[in-house]
């Protein structure tokens, strides 16, 4: 199962890359796709992203205060939604609370960087595999095994990308 990981900005990019590695361990049949890693050098990046968005029915938008209203995030969220028939578009709120999210992203199911919330995201991804997914008791054990690594890596990213640095390096519209 392909999972599109959307990001914009340094903090969001680091979380997307970490999440890609982590999800690959928790659900080994999961194939996270991150533009920074998965677009071949010399490829037309917009075409690659567009093709992947067309072919993917589940995505995680890594949202920060920095990128909340960035056009690219909104474009990718809309492309992933595709009418939401069988698509799943989840947000991972990195340094935001659900009340800070406005339309159109406010209508999505938000994930917080907390154990129970991340577990619900993992369950959603696993259920997208239908009969190829892990049994729930196995999923829970694998999740519990890898959860401490998620916490450590996430906190390192937050600590190394403080909001003052983010604000000074972000491009203002």
Image (cartoon, rainbow, N blue to C red):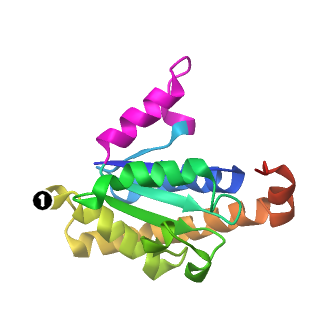
Residue 139 coordinates in the image, percent (x, y): 29, 69
Highlighted range, magenta: 36-56
Q: Is residue 167 visible?
A: yes
Residue 83 coordinates in the image, percent (x, y): 29, 57
- Give the vertical position of 118 relative to 88 (above or below): below
Residue at 66% x, 71% y: name it: 95
Residue 91 coordinates in the image, percent (x, y): 48, 65
35 on left or right of 58: right
In front: 22, or 141?
22
Residue at 28% x, 48% y: name it: 1
In front: 159, or 46?
46
Q: Quadrant of residue 81?
A: bottom left
6 on left or right of 172: left
Dot 1: few (<14), some (14–19), or many (≥20) neighbours within 10 Å?
Answer: few
Q: Which residue is mark 1?
A: 131
Q: Residue 65: within the magenta?
A: no
């Amino acid at each position: 199962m392909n999972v599109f990981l959307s990001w914009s900005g340094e903090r969001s990019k680091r979380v997307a890359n970490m999440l890609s590695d982590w999800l690959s361990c928790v659900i080994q049949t999961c194939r996270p796709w991150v533009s920074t890693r998965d677009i071949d050098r010399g490829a037309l990046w917009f075409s690659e992203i567009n093709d992947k968005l067309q072919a993917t029915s589940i995505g995680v938008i890594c949202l920060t205060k920095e990128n909340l209203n960035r056009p690219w995030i909104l474009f990718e969220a809309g492309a992933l939604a595709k009418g939401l028939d069988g698509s799943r578009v989840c947000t991972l709120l990195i340094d935001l609370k659900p009340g800070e999210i406005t339309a159109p992203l406010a209508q999505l199911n938000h994930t917080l960087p907390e154990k129970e919330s991340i577990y619900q995201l993992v369950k959603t991804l696993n259920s997208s595999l239908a009969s190829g997914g892990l049994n729930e008791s196995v999923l829970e054990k694998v999740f519990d095994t890898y959860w401490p690594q998620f916490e450590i890596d996430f906190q390192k990213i937050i600590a190394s990308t403080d909001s003052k640095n983010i604000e000074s390096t972000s491009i203002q519209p």
